[in-house]
Image (cartoon, rainbow, N blue to C red):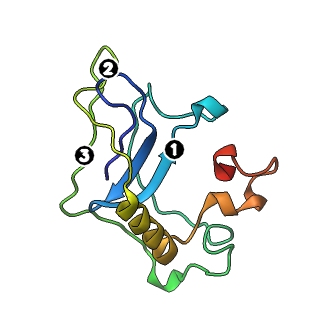
């Protein structure tokens, strides 16, 4: 997985790209000027978990967990996190600013339409005050 929050120049990037096997899966735009928080000063972490969310995260609860396959587990092979390392002073090491070109934007839309099961931006029931602001930008 790759993310590009802040290049070493100190200039905040215009987006944070998340990729798996060099395939873009999410492009989080820097909309700080419109009051939307953007990860630029804090370290980021990568974690994963297995949990039951079949009442809301699986196509609005339409797809239920098949418990006959339990216990569930996950593993990673050949995992390589391509990310900057924050130094003791809080500055990022060498990094880069990468915008998604048209081809990568198309690939990301293809991945999302063919593999994304849940998108919080299309789940107004989860947010009592409405979906987060970045969903309408």
Would you identify the image quadrant in which residue 65 lies?
bottom right
Residue pointed to by mark 3: 82
In this view, the mark in front (3 or 1): 1
Q: Is residue 79 left or right of residue 14?
A: left
Separation of residues labelled 3 and 1 (CA atoms): 19 Å
Would you identify the image quadrant in which residue 92 lies?
top left
Residue at the farthest left position: 78
Residue at the farthest bottom position: 68
Q: Secondary structure at mark 3?
A: loop
Evaluate if marks 2 and 1 touch, with contact meaning CB atoms under 8 Å apart: no
Foreground residue, 66 or 117? 117
Residue at the farthest top position: 89
Evaluate if marks 3 and 1 touch, with contact meaning CB atoms under 8 Å apart: no
Whichever of labels 3 and 1 marks the residue nearer the N terminus, that label is 1
Whichever of labels 2 and 3 marks the residue nearer the N terminus, that label is 3
Count of numbered circles on the image:
3
Can you tell which mark lies on residue 120? none
Separation of residues labelled 2 and 3 (CA atoms): 17 Å
Residue pointed to by mark 1: 29
Percent x, y of residue 16: 43, 43
Foreground residue, 6 or 100? 100
Foreground residue, 77 or 112? 112
Q: Secondary structure at mark 2?
A: loop
Density class for disc 2 (Cα within 10 Å; few <14, some 14-19, many ≥20) is: some
Foreground residue, 85 or 110? 110
Percent x, y of residue 28: 50, 47
Residue pointed to by mark 2: 91
């Amino acid at each position: 997985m790759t993310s590009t929050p802040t290049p070493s120049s100190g200039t905040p990037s215009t987006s944070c790209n998340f990729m798996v096997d060099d395939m873009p899966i999410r492009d989080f735009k820097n909309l700080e000027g419109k009051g939307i928080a953007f990860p630029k000063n804090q370290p980021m972490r990568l974690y994963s978990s297995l949990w039951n969310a079949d009442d809301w995260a699986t196509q609005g609860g339409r797809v239920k967990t098949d418990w006959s396959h339990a216990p569930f587990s996950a593993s990673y092979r050949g995992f390589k996190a391509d990310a900057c390392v924050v130094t003791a002073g809080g500055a990022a090491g060498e990094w880069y600013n990468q915008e998604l070109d048209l081809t990568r934007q198309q690939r990301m839309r293809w991945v999302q339409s063919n593999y994304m099961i849940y998108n919080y931006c299309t789940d107004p029931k989860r947010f009592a005050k409405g979906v987060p602001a970045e969903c309408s930008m």
